[in-house]
Amino acid sequence: MKKYVEEFKQILETENKEKAVEYALNLLKNKKIDVICLYSEILAPALNNMYCSLSDKDVCIWKEHVRTAIVRTIVECCYPFVIEMSDKNLNKGSAVILCPPEEYHDLGARMVADYLKICGYSAVFVGSNTPYSDFYNAIEKIKPDLIAISVSNYYNLVATKKIIEDLRKKTDSRIIVGGYAFSMNSANVAMVGADYYAETFEDIKNIVEKEASI
Amino acid sequence: MNNILELKNVNKIYGTAVKTQVLTDISLNFEKGSFNSIIGQSGSGKSTLLNIIGTLDTPTSGEVILDGVDTGTASKNRLADLRNKSIGFVFQFHYLLPEFTALENVLMPYRIGGGKVSKEILEKAKEYLTLVGLEKVINNNATKMSGGQQQRTAIARAILNNPSIILADEPTGNLDSDSTETIYNLLRDINEKFRTTFIIITHDRHIAEKADRIIEIKDGKINMDIKKA
């Protein structure tokens, strides 16, 4: 695994999109690793531990965006493998995955959508910067069993708390939170009033098992 | 880390016949050298809270301990001394005197306090005006400066006494986004260079999200108190 992590990291640093996509998909095609492993061991760490040298400091954000876009392409290309990995006979319920208004970092949420699909949920990825009122109004029609909210910028925790408070008045859906705003300070989890906090695929799996036992 | 400011069960009620409770049971600690923002809708009680912290107003009940001094039991003179030496204020409107230069405005609180402007104080005022990037307009009248420059002069004025805490009420409320960024960077530099504690009321998410801690006041109560890390 270490070898794949290192090789992918090196390719990503060159920002060669074609090569990075090909490399990641070949790992899956050749059954070297599965999608969960690709996301949690290779892609997420590659994004979280992005290195930017001092000489590149003026273009760090640019580089981060370019590399994130490459990883996003890989994730989208992985969907057939996600379908293959998910048990079609399982129907644990429905889940919606979103980011609060003005939260633009949605790649973690996108991966969580696939995790939930693999765990047997029909997962709808709503995406970044979800307009609050549209989502709030749609919830009654969608009636999801799970709502997963991803927050990176800790300022958006303020809106997240309000969203969760309002959702509680309208739905019995179980609410999961995750993202950088929580992993940087675990005390923030208690602040927003969610049912669960998830950081890894294992966390998602445990939540799904717990929900199934209720 | 030491707390520079502690609020214990602070309540504020205005009026006697008709009572309006503006703050309810506010308890907060602020660590020395921390960079905090306070957010909340208009009328939520943010400015009242800041005025109480700055000893410009008094709580109806509760304690405010600033730099080790219980402001509820301190004498008027002690409070005035505390305000002058421990607290710097920055407001949305800079309150510079238009007929005076940037340098004279920075020195104004010192003059009002009765202090003769020594060579050291003069040099310090110039140094701080340089720190805020105004060395070229030091002798310009306040009216001959841009909004951002005026606010930077107000900041230089606020730090002249090396206060341990700076209270800012919408310091970028009047500024465009570029000037807002300049002011934020300046406040952060001061925070890092002098370990000055900052408590900033702001409606500007770009300022709030860069603070190390966000406190949301809602209907006079603490609705959220979150730290970045």
Image (spheres, coloured by chain):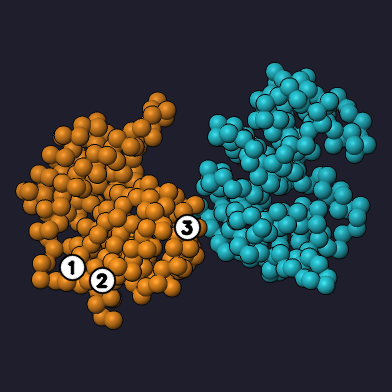
Judged from this view, the residue extending furthest toward the bottom is A214
Q: In this view, does B196 lie to the left or right of B19?
A: left
Find disc 1 in the rendering and name its residue. Answer: A120
Q: Is the residue marked by circle 2 packed among few (<14), some (14-19), or many (20+) residues within 10 Å?
A: some
Question: What is the chain identity of the residue bearing mark 2?
Answer: A
Disc sitting over residue A159 in the figure = 3
Question: What x and y, as percent, mark residue B41?
Answer: 60, 56
Q: In the figure, residue A176 lies in which quadrant?
A: bottom left
Residues at discs 3 and 2 both on one chain: yes
Looking at the picture, which amino acid does disc 1 mark?
A: Gly
Seen in the picture, residue B129 relative to A5 is either above or below; the reply is above
Looking at the picture, which amino acid does disc 3 mark?
A: Ala
Question: What is the chain identity of the residue bearing mark 1?
Answer: A
Question: What x and y, as percent, mark residue B223?
Answer: 57, 64
Seen in the picture, residue A29 relative to B134 is either above or below; the reply is below
Q: What element carries label 3?
A: helix
Disc sitting over residue A208 in the figure = 2
Q: Nearer the viewer, residue A26 or B226?
A: B226
Instruction: Choose the circle earlier in sequence order: 3 or 2.
Output: 3
Question: What x and y, as percent, mark residue A140?
Answer: 33, 69
Q: The orange chain is which one?
A: A
Looking at the picture, which amino acid does disc 2 mark?
A: Val
